[in-house]
Structures are given as structure tokens and as C-alpha cells.
Image (spheres, rainbow, N blue to C red):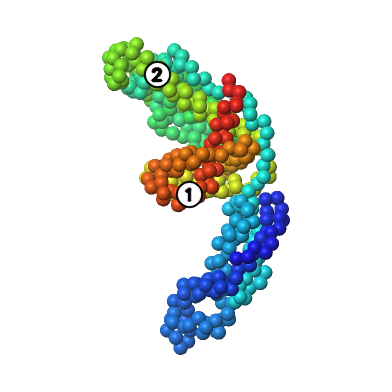
Amino acid sequence: MELKNVNKVDTNKVELEIAVDGETFTKAINKVFKRQSKNILIPGFRKGKAPRSVVEKMYGKEVFYEDAMKEVYPEAVQEAADEAELRTVPDRVELDVVEVSEDGFTFKVKLTTYPEVTISDYKGIEIEALSDEVTDEKIDEEILNARKRAGSIQTITDRAVEKDDTAVIDFEGFKDGEPFEGGKGEMYNLVIGSGNFIPGFEDQIIGHTTGEEFTVNVTFPEEYQVPELAGQPAEFKVKLHEIKARILPELDDEFVQDVSSESETVEQYREEISKELAETLKQQRETDISNKLADALSEKVEGEIPQAMYDNRVTDMLKETEMRLRQQGLDMNLYMQYTGMTEDLLREQYAEDAEKQVKLRLALEKIAELEAIEPTAEELDEEYGKLAEMYKLDVEKVKELVPTEDITRDVSVSKAMNLVKENANIK
């Protein structure tokens, strides 16, 4: 391979002119011929037994050129990009053959290159993070949740519907006196206060008693998914069949002993909950800080970023989703059927997060460069060790699979984020 010319044709776009020598090209032609020969039928020869010279005489010497060039060019392009010291972005390759013969071929290829970005004011970022203070109110809330989990659902006959009850109802919706599609249900279990129905619907169930039939008047939201109903008033005929409520156990020592393996009294249980909350709230605060700093950094980075980087990140996110589904015993196609999703819709959903993630990575790489952040040998070994443990592989095998350059960038990015966090103004 010979890199003949490097020409920047646009922002983040470089054209390379590359020559492949005759020996390399001939080896590729031989490889293609061996792969395709079994399917070639020439009069006078058994299928797949015709010599290459005979095939080329009948179809022309160029018969294998195109496939041979496809065989060779990926490695040639990578070698040329390395020689030109280009950091490229995976993208659709634009290939233009200049000349080709048995002595080799020359071609031009346009590559998308990593963008040059700038960032400033990454020290002293001000954010207001979640509080990690353990209060009596938070402890009471956690204990209430535990009581709800331990509670039982019972039918209520001696009172009207209240918030948090489950109302078992029949309903049918009418617009301008006519029933509309999708507006009817029977023996529907509606949790009052869940927000599952049109705004105002659940509130009008409160106060009614079992066996009552009544009318609920609502107005559909302006952004409602059915255009002919969006922003329109509607009337629902409702019949209340049953009221169900979750009956909570009393907060006493007996309850504590049922739900806790560590505490025997209410006082001890509150201390247990307090310790658990302290750790949970601390983790939540750290996550919140990281997320808010990430958002701030992604907004501060400036530069012309190739669309391919966003598209590639979306593709990675799709693969990650598919992997998670497989771990749960689900198939991606089946998941999309159940949810009514398509790959295009998923890509649209992931697009915003993908853009933030790409910008964040670029921001942190730039900060690492500006701050001359470099990982130590010990930090690289530690990162390789984590990957080996994650994928259940030997460390040496991981080192073969993952280039040191990639690990170095990952560790540098992590250290850059720590620098930003250490210098942030966190309230």
C-alpha cells in the first residue's frame, strides 16, 4: 500500500489517494477466484474445475477485479489512515477507482474524521444537587412504603371512594352524544390518583359509593393522541361496581419483626431505615451530580460534529437494548411487536440521549488533552482487570482484544470527569 495524497475536502472530511501494489492485488484475485470457482461453469470442464486462465479468457481479466478490490481496500484504507495519523469515524465509505490493472489499482476514498472541538469554563460549574440529608419525613415515607407492601387489598362497603382506592367501574365515553372508539371499558380497575385516565376523570369518581351510576365530564388534552378528540369535551357514563382499598398493618413491634431481619422494635427499625436511607441518598446525590455535570459539559462543548457519530451511538444503544432483552429471555423483534415500536421509532427516542453522550465524550477528551491527563500503568492494569472480570476472560486475552489506546482514552475521560467534579461548585 502506498499513500499517494491526503486532501482535506471539508470539515471532518478527508480524501486519501491510495495505491495497492500488484502482488497484493494478485493475491486478492487468487483468493476471490478460489472462493467463486466452485460456482463457475465453463463448457468442456466440470463445474468448478475450469482454470483461472480459461475463466479470464472467456469473461475477461477484469472479471475478478471488483471483488478483489473489495477484499483489499478495507485494510489498505486503515493502513493509509494510520500513516496519515487520522482518527476516523465509522461512516459510509465513498470509494472512487482511479485506475486498475493486473499490476494493482489506485483509488480515492473520502473518510469522516474525528472533530476538533473546544471547551471552556469547565472548572467551577455551579449545580444544585439532590440533598442527602436523612430527615424524619423521609424515614416516615420509607416506613409507609413498607407498610403498603405488607398491606392487603380488601373490598370496602361502608364508605365512598377516596384517593388511592381502586374503583372497579364500567364506563363509556360520548362526544356530541355519540360513543367514540376506544372509550368503553367493563370491570376496569382504576387506581384513584394514578393519573392513568384523562385529567379530571379520577377526581370525579371520589365521593361515589358502590352501585352508583353517574356522569363524568372531562375535556381531552390538546396534545391527545387521537386528533378528533384532542381538546374536545366528552361525557362518560360510569357505573361503580366495587371499591377496593389497601389496608395497612399497624406500625408496632410485631410488624417490624415481620418485615425486618435486623430489628425487633419500632425504634430499632427507624434506625435501620435511617442507615439504609443515608447510603441510598448518598448514591442518588452522586448520580445526580454526575448527570448534571454531564449535561453542563455537553452544552459547553463547541465544534462541528459529524452526524455519523450520533448515528453510531444510537446504533450502539440499540445493540445494548437488544443485549439487555436477551438477558431477560426476550427477543428484540418480539419486544417491538408487543410495544408497537419500530427500529426507526427507537432511533428517534434514543437520538437526544445519543447526542448528549457524544458531546460529553468529546468534552471530556478535550479536557483530558488541555489538562495533560494521562493514566498511570497501574490505572490501565486496573481497567483491564475490570473488563476481564466483566467478560469472564483472562486479562491477557482482553489486552489482545482491546487496544491500549482505547483503554487509555477511557481512563483519561474518567479522570477528566473527576477533575470537573472536584472543581465544581456543588450546592
Note whether 175 is above or below 9 in the view shown. Answer: above
Provide the secondary structure element on which disc 1 rests: loop
**Residue pictured at 50% horizontal, 74% vertical:** 30
Q: Position of residue 17 (x, y in %)?
A: 67, 63
Q: Amino acid at mark 2?
A: Lys
Report if the CB atoms under discs 1 and 2 are less than 8 Å apart. no
| Residue toward you, 240 or 367 | 367
Q: Position of residue 57 (x, y in %)?
A: 55, 84
- Residue at the spot of label 2: 275
Q: Position of residue 12 (x, y in %)?
A: 67, 50
Note whether 241 is above or below 401 in the view shown. Answer: above
**Residue pictured at 51% horizontal, 29% vertical:** 287
Note whether 109 is above or below 388 in the view shown. Answer: below
Query: Mark 1, residues whose alpha carbon is within 10 Å: few (<14), some, or many (≥20)?
Result: few
Label disc, if present, on residue 233 of the rendered structure: none
| Residue toward you, 203 or 339 | 339
- Residue at the spot of label 1: 402
Residue 420: tell me if it is visible. Answer: yes
Quadrant of the image for the N terminus? Answer: bottom right
